[in-house]
Image: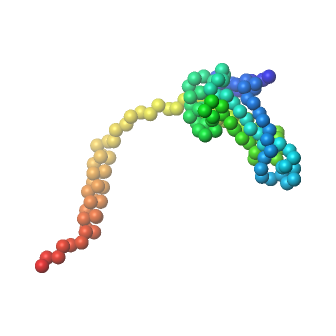
Amino acid sequence: MTMINITRTVSIHESEIHLQFVRASGPGGQNVNKVATAVQLRFDVGNSPSLPGDVRVRLIRMAGRRITRDGILIIEARQFRTQERNREDAMGRLVELIRRAAEKPKPRKKTRPSPASKERRMEEKKQRGITKKMRRTVPDID
């Protein structure tokens, strides 16, 4: 078995990935009813020894509905007519997802609005209030 390199620090063992071939819907003519070309890739994120803790947490958050309660990531590939291309597509999507999860998010720096921007904001609010005031009906003086 070989290792799949994702980043310089993260790589997963091929044995951690389970592939299942199922029948696909869509193009393929009569062949679609006979040949299982769609791929269902399963990767146990929760119990994977290859993933560092922070990457695991980000991957679970990024996966969304593609992850089960047990922590298994399921990627379905049925775009192509051949098993091989669907397998490559599923593997590529898994690698890309893990690669994005491996990137540390840039910490947010707190910023404050400048005094000039506060002044501009207040001026715009005054102008808007004046515009609205001008739209009001004038009471009749009888």
Quick one: which residue is furthest to the bottom in this view? 142
Depth order, front residue of 1/106: 1
Q: What is the image's colouring?
A: rainbow
Depth order, front residue of 137/24: 24
Apparent side of residue 85 relative to residue 111 in the rendered image (left or right): right
Q: Residue at x 28, y 69 (%)?
A: 135
Q: Residue at x 63, y 34 (%)?
A: 68
Q: Is residue 56 visible in the rendered structure shown here?
A: yes
Apparent side of residue 73 relative to residue 57 in the rendered image (left or right): right
Q: Residue at x 82, y 39 (%)?
A: 84
Height in image: 93 above or below 79? Answer: above
Residue 79 appears at what percent x and percent y? 75, 47
Quick one: which residue is furthest to the front in this view? 69
Q: Is residue 8 visible in the rendered structure shown here?
A: no
> Tag count in the figure?
0
Q: Residue at x 74, y 38 (%)?
A: 40
Depth order, front residue of 13/123: 13
Q: Quadrant of the N terminus?
A: top right
Residue 15 appears at what percent x and percent y? 76, 24
Height in image: 101 above or below 136? Answer: above
Residue 73 appears at what percent x and percent y? 66, 34
Quick one: which residue is furthest to the left in this view? 142
Can you tell which quarter of the image residue 96 is in?
Answer: top right
Can you tell which quarter of the image residue 63 is in?
Answer: top right
Q: Quadrant of the C terminus?
A: bottom left
Apparent side of residue 98 relative to residue 23 in the rendered image (left or right): left
